[in-house]
Image (tube, grey):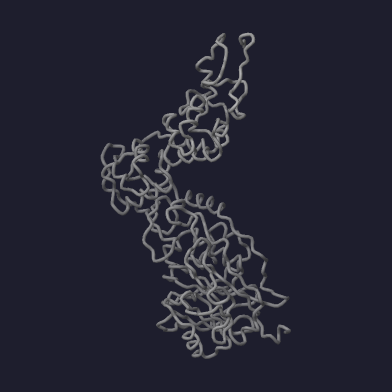
Amino acid sequence: MLVKMGQTSSFPKSRRRSLRSPFLFRRSSKANLSHTFSLPEECSKIEQLNVNFASEEELMTLPGINREIAKGIIRHRQQIGRFRKIEDLALVPGIGAENLDRIKAEVCVRSNNSNSNSRAQSVDSLKCETRIQSKLINLNKASVFDLQETLGITQEMAANIVCYRTKKGDFKKIEDLLKVKSISAMRYTNMCQHLTIEDESGDSNLSRTTSASEVRTNGSVLANGTSTPTKHRKTSSAPVKLHVANGLPSPSSLGDIFDLLSAYSHRPIPEEDFRFKRNGKDAIRVATWNLDGFSFEKAQNMGVREVVCRTILENRWSIVCFQDVLEEEALQLIVDELNFPRLRKVTEFRANSREWQCSVLDSHLAFIYDTQSGSIGVDMITLKQETLEEYRAALAEFTVGLVRLQILNVELHEKVPVEMIEEKLKELKDPNQLVVLGDFTNLVCGDQRREIGNLQAVLPVQSNTSSNNVKTKYSDNILVSGNVKSLLTGSWSVVRQGLTHLAIPNGWSWGGTVSPHCPIWTELYVAPPSENGF
């Protein structure tokens, strides 16, 4: 390649070092190249960077483009769609007229041929390529998966479209998309040309029917296809209706997708491998957990079942008191999963006796217990419902090893002064063998006490047991009395990790929690103090 004698070819000083080939020239208004040769048009385009496919690192090789701006470019094309002309880059925050003028000659928005980009494409590039439309998507039949394959439609927008369609009925015209939450006029313009309300025969589909294989479940759109959030009393992981017919091609695919979500929903590593022993003596763990409107639909969510079962198994609980269980069938799904596991992460947990039983009362209070608990043995003798206006309560009597325990499961549904609780506890037949577990959020207490009457609290009264990122303060606790105090091993915990799953709805996104309440547990020896050698 010849250059006029005495003249040096150079790149602008402001251009940062490029990851692209140093042997290919790019056109630049600032370049001072000799007129003794000309750069062919096709060569000048080979080195242009396609902003619709470039990775974050590749975008940062452009002059004036830092990491924040590069992320903005990628965010724009993921949320709104591909850039149709280079001038559209001005819509990205941080670029502006000056940066646009600086990079204009170095970028393109269309692939000209197979050699237009010799670099390996990034993961983001592959995502963009898969969104090229080969046919129109029927707005009244498409699942959330189908909609997300449409140019410019994000997961949130797809969920909003399905929700609107379920509540309002089929779309009469494409323009009705403008009534859907999160779809602006600009986004509508990008996506409307890829959508239709007519089926392949050309007839409008204004009466979408439900397939016989349609099922109602509290699963995730990522597990079953379409999502219809419904009003739920107070839980963020509200039930959603899913339609298998509108989702994946076969039921086996549902399991495959859930396994993928499960793999990325990491479980915490237990602090210790508890084997029903403490200081060489037999011991068990007793826990309490408010499941926040635990309905049958909610329990059908595979992510919910996995989190509940794995939390029970990982912490080696023997007796669990649940509050806010709306239906007995909901808890039965949990017990069935423990005894006959089908979810991979539950099946893989080998330290599971598979000898679980449950009892649910009309007061929305429930117990599940592991009858084996190593080789200790747990058995429920009696169960009765306490009919108290101020709070819900259920009293169960258990034999655990060599001791007999009265366990009172409590949920305060109205503001209750601590003095009233103390009076009610005095009415119990054998208050010295009592463990009280439950939700004390509405307990009115003026100080941070560790005792209510003669009961010792494991946590300070009114401690915060809310899940992460929950603004409301909850106060769950465990209280023990009399002889039970001498059975405490001193080990207890508020479980804050492993309560979320990618298959659980979280508003209009995913990765929600089973309940805004954290479960808590304490540990008890299962033989009288004299036999424990104390």
Q: Position of residue 124 (x, y in %)?
A: 52, 38
Picture layout, residue 5 above or below residue 402: above
Residue nearer the viewer, 301 or 425: 425
Classify residue 416 by image quadrant.
bottom left
Quadrant in the picture for the C terminus: bottom right
Residue shown at 68%/85% (left/top)?
529
Picture layout, residue 60 above or below residue 487: above
Quadrant in the picture for the N terminus: top right
Residue nearer the viewer, 165 or 354: 165
Residue nearer the viewer, 72 or 398: 72
Picture layout, residue 483 above or below residue 493: below
Q: Describe residue 532's horizontal placement relative to residue 144 as left or right.
A: right
Q: Describe residue 460's horizontal placement relative to residue 324 as left or right.
A: right
Picture layout, residue 136 above or below residue 452: above
Q: Position of residue 403 (x, y in %)?
A: 62, 84
Classify residue 84 by image quadrant.
top left
Residue nearer the viewer, 262 or 387: 387
Residue shown at 59%/71% (left/top)?
317
Q: How many marks?
A: 0
Q: Position of residue 193 (x, y in %)?
A: 34, 35
